[in-house]
Amino acid sequence: MRLRFSNILTNLTLALFFSGVMAQNLVHNGGFEDFVNCPVKMSNLNGDTEYWSAPTLGTTDYFNKCSKTKLGIPMNFKGKQEAYEGNAYAGLYLFAPKDYREYIQVELTETLKKGHRYRLSLSLSLSEKSDGAVMDLGAVFAQKPLSIHTKRQLSNAVLASSQTRTTHAKQFSATGFYDDKKEWMQVSLDIVAKGFERHLVLGNFKSNGGTHYLDFGKRTAGAEGYSYYYLDDISLIYLGPDYQPDQSYVLNHVNFDFDRFELEPKAKQSLKDVYDYLKKHPQLKVSISGHTDDQGSDDYNDVLSKQRAATVARYLMRLGLKPHRISSKGYGNKLPLDSALTDKARRKNRRVEFVMTEFVEDE
């Protein structure tokens, strides 16, 4: 089966485009345009490119139009392919005899936020001289850069034995083999961050036996073939928090000044994240609860907490949330997060929380 990829923008990208907001790519040098040296020898990604490196003994390659050797673009030692964009791309084996593998890794521009969603996307093309195609391409996120002394696949067991904290490998979604040698294919996957991820590793994390492999019938009998791919246009963009129904969340930056219920500037972005999530999940409604510190009378704090919850509710409705999807209530100082009698604890308690729940139809 052959994959067909269109070049149309996703709904997310369209929304960002028309709102005039460009999503920031958290991958350094995602198009491989920045380089230290114009490539003159194979297996030198580590020395030639900015930010990118090989995390194992696998010898990943770097291609650039500036090169007059077999590492040029469009003609190179693996065939012919123009860059997806710009003047450069990387090349690596996703399938080779004896489980030989090549990988690329890069440091991200920031550590990912725990419980927040991200979308990883890239473009790939199968080299003309490949014996076959695969449909197994994955990503691993690590706390620190990997340096593993192997030429074989980075299985989850190998990753777990390393001294660096990593995620399990996650596969890009595929409905068929990545077998296009002419056009670039676009793939993506969404993740929810655990909060330690600072480095990205790409490649095939499965053994030959576990890899879906399409043999083109070019290899000699009894020999294992290989699949070599070009990669370009790698990006990781932030999608927002991953809120779970029926769980209570404290709104980031929505900690009010003493005796006040106006929103601070940073609070508005946190509320925009909540609104965006509710907009994408119309089956959910939200309950807002306001809280105070222990200063003042109970009656006064009850009123102040209601005002704080109502302020948040009004702002969400101003953004476009329908009134029937939101409710608010004040709890005064009855439910403190921190019972210490300090200024820091009191500021923490001057907060707003929310819970998202699904609509329940009336019987």
Image (spheres, rainbow, N blue to C red):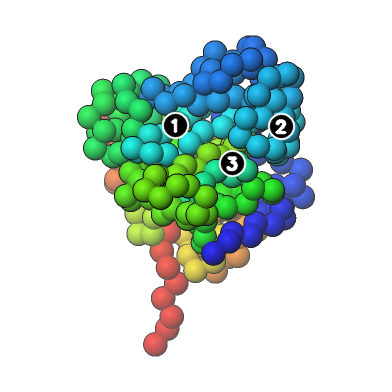
| Residue 292 in which image quadrant | top left
Which quadrant does the N terminus fall into? bottom right
Single out the residue that lies furthest toward the bottom.
363
Q: Amino acid at mark 3?
A: Lys
Name the residue located 44 percent from the left edge and 31 percent from the top edge.
102
Name the residue furthest front.
221
Residue at 35% x, 59% y: name it: 246
Report the mark closest to the observer, 2 or 1: 2
User: Pointer 1: what residue?
Assistant: 102
Residue identifier under label 2: 75
Q: Identity of the amino acid at label 1?
A: Glu
Q: Nearer the viewer, residue 205 or 227?
A: 227
Q: Position of residue 240 (x, y in %)?
A: 52, 45
Circle 2: residue type: Met
The reply to whether residue 126 is in sight is: yes
Q: Nearer the viewer, residue 288 or 272?
A: 272
Q: Which residue is mark 3?
A: 129
Q: State the SS at label 2.
A: strand
